[in-house]
Image: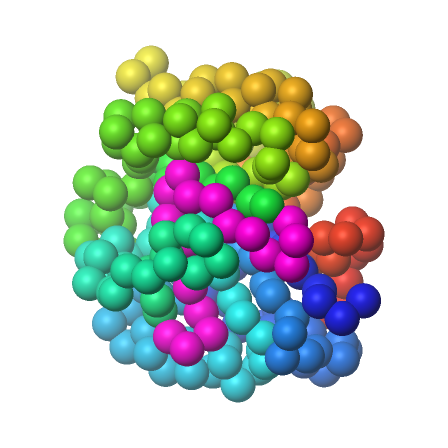
Amino acid sequence: MDKRIFITGDKHGAITPFFGLKEKQDLRDSDIMLITGDAGYVFYDDYKYTIGTLEQLFPGKIAFIDGNHENFDILGTMDEEVWCGGKVHRVSDRIYHLMRGELFEIYGNRFFVFGGARTTESFDREPGKGWWPEDEEPTADEIAYGQMQLEENLHEIDYVISHEAPRLVREFTSRKKHVPEDYVLPDVLDGWYHKASEGQNFKGWFFGHMHIDQEIEPGLMGLHNEVLLLETGQRVKW
Ligand SMILES: [Fe+2]
């Protein structure tokens, strides 16, 4: 297995798992780490130091979708490029932000990704200081774009990665994360999950946000701390 893809959940800026991986795994330049949102490495104004540390610890590429806890002001200033067939913000040489509704072909696997979620917990952050409420939730246009991409490429998609979870997930978790009436994304993703499941190549949907490592049903998996090797689903020690 030369070309390995790892996947993990919300990191919120944590570096410790990457120290562990470096220590316990034989990491290679060809490795790719996917993160299901709330990576949190582009968060503070001095984020470049964090990115530098990550690049020292992980020799391959790191690609994250956005969650609801990201510094969208900084992400928005980054160059937009195409990587593996989809639009990204180029964070650094080997680190990318995968944009909402894009498709990526990575080592022969096609991924459809959709970041973003609404922060519904009450907390006392000020907008622009650790919380960017204007950009955290996908817009109607972004949802329409995602819908089109999913429908047009349905039978080529192997995996879906979202930050928010399809609505049905809340029936299986203790952490409910309230869904206000005007917050449509969980229901949209519920519909997309059922649609994606009909795809000829569909193998699985991964989501973050709920902070759980839990298989909801075959093909639907919440990720938080665990790092999985995509090809086998095997849990990797860190
Ligand atoms: Fe999170």
Of residues 4 and 107, the one drawn nearer to the viewer in this rendering: 107
Residue drawn at the location 20% of the way across and 63% of the way down? 77
Answer whether residue 103 is magenta in the image.
Answer: yes
Answer whether residue 61 is magenta in the image.
Answer: no
Which quarter of the rendering shows the N terminus? bottom right
The spot of residue 219 in percent (x, y) is: 72, 32
Where on the picture, by quarter, is residue 213?
top right
Q: In this picture, is 98 found above or below 148? A: below
Residue found at the far top of this picture: 181
Task: Using the rendered image of the protein, determine whether residue 41 is visible from the camera's viewpoint.
Answer: yes
Residue drawn at the location 76% of the way across and 76% of the way down? 25
Residue drawn at the location 60% of the way across and 37% of the way down? 157
The spot of residue 153 in percent (x, y) is: 52, 32
Q: In this picture, is 36 found above or below 162? A: below
The colour scheme is: rainbow
Of residues 34 and 121, the one drawn nearer to the viewer in this rendering: 34
Q: Which residues are magenta?
A: 92-109
Which quarter of the rendering shows the C terminus? bottom right
The spot of residue 43 in percent (x, y) is: 32, 64
Residue drawn at the location 63% of the way across and 79% of the way down? 29
The spot of residue 46 in percent (x, y) is: 28, 77
